[in-house]
Image (cartoon, rainbow, N blue to C red):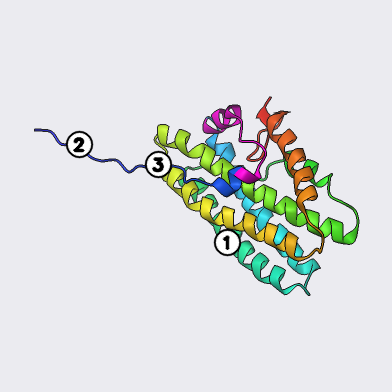
Amino acid sequence: MTTSVDLPVIEAPAIPEIDAFLLCSTPQAWVDYALNHLDLVLIDHAQCEKKAAAAAMSLMHRHPDRFELLMKMSQLAREELLHFEQVVKLLLERSIPYQSLVPGRYAKKIRQYIRTSELGRFVDLLIVGAIIEARSCERFAALIPGLVAQGEMGLAKYYRSLIKSEARHFEDYLYLANLYTDKPITERVAALLEAEKQLIESPDPVFRFHSGVPA
């Protein structure tokens, strides 16, 4: 009589709040390319975590009088740096050298839509932060089924563990954007999300964690 060993089932958790927020899902072409270039995915993922921590620290330096922002960005920066350390460890385990990559177009292009007034720029930066965190969360979830199919169970499990914190970061940024303005942010969110959608769905000559369709 033979017995089968039950393998752990790793599935991407449901993220309805993220799905309802973003205007599009990650194109399958990006997922397919990413699964065939995991070394590049991990290097840029590490770089993204470091940049996210730096962005949070920058907001803290620029707005020392905003208590709620200081508390949430302090926690966010610590978590992003922890994630950076974890991804660098994954690179080491896989004998992949960490290196600085030329940034893709994603963040730079979205920031071109940010308003120039002091308050407008501040609120839009928070909204952009929410969008980037939401897209990160969505991409982790998009990668998990393919990682499992490739037998990359450890990486699939790790990315699953990140989804909860990324979703919280998304919520924190949106909370702060609403907190620090008396006007509804609905129109600004819609405009910046539309810009993000165009970047995600259009051909992109440089593959990165937040890039568009690989050209």
Give the residue drawn at x 49%, y 43%: 95
| Residue 112 located within the stretch drawn in magenta | no
Whether residue 127 sits left or right of residue 29 in the image: it is: right
Considering every residue shown, the one lying at the far right of the view is 117
Disc 3 is placed on an element classified as: helix
The residue that label 3 is drawn on is 153
Q: Which residues are magenta?
A: 20-35
Q: Is residue 135 visible?
A: no
Mark 1 → mark 2, Cα distance in angstroms:
39 Å
The residue that label 2 is drawn on is 4
Counting residues from the start of the chain, the first of labels 3 and 2 encountered is: 2
**Can you say which quadrant of the picture contains the C terminus?**
top right
Q: Which mark is residue 115?
A: none
Q: Residues within 10 Å of mark 1 (few under 14, many from 20)?
A: some
Count of marks placed on residues: 3
Q: Could you say where residue 207 lies in the image, as x and y percent from the top left? A: 66, 33
In the image, residue 16 above or below residue 2: below
**Can you say which quadrant of the picture contains the N terminus?**
top left
Disc 2 is placed on an element classified as: loop
Q: Are dots 3 and 2 in contact, CB under 8 Å?
A: no
Whether residue 6 sits left or right of residue 156 in the image: it is: left
Give the residue drawn at x 41%, y 36%: 148
Q: Tag 3: residue type?
A: Met
Mark 1 → mark 3, Cα distance in angstroms:
23 Å
Q: Could you say where residue 138 lies in the image, as x and y percent from the top left? A: 58, 43
Q: Which mark is residue 79?
A: 1
Q: Is residue 167 visible?
A: yes
Counting residues from the start of the chain, the first of labels 1 and 3 encountered is: 1
Q: Residues within 10 Å of mark 2 (few under 14, many from 20)?
A: few
Q: Tag 2: residue type?
A: Ser
Give the residue drawn at x 85%, y 57%: 120
Counting residues from the start of the chain, the first of labels 1 and 2 encountered is: 2
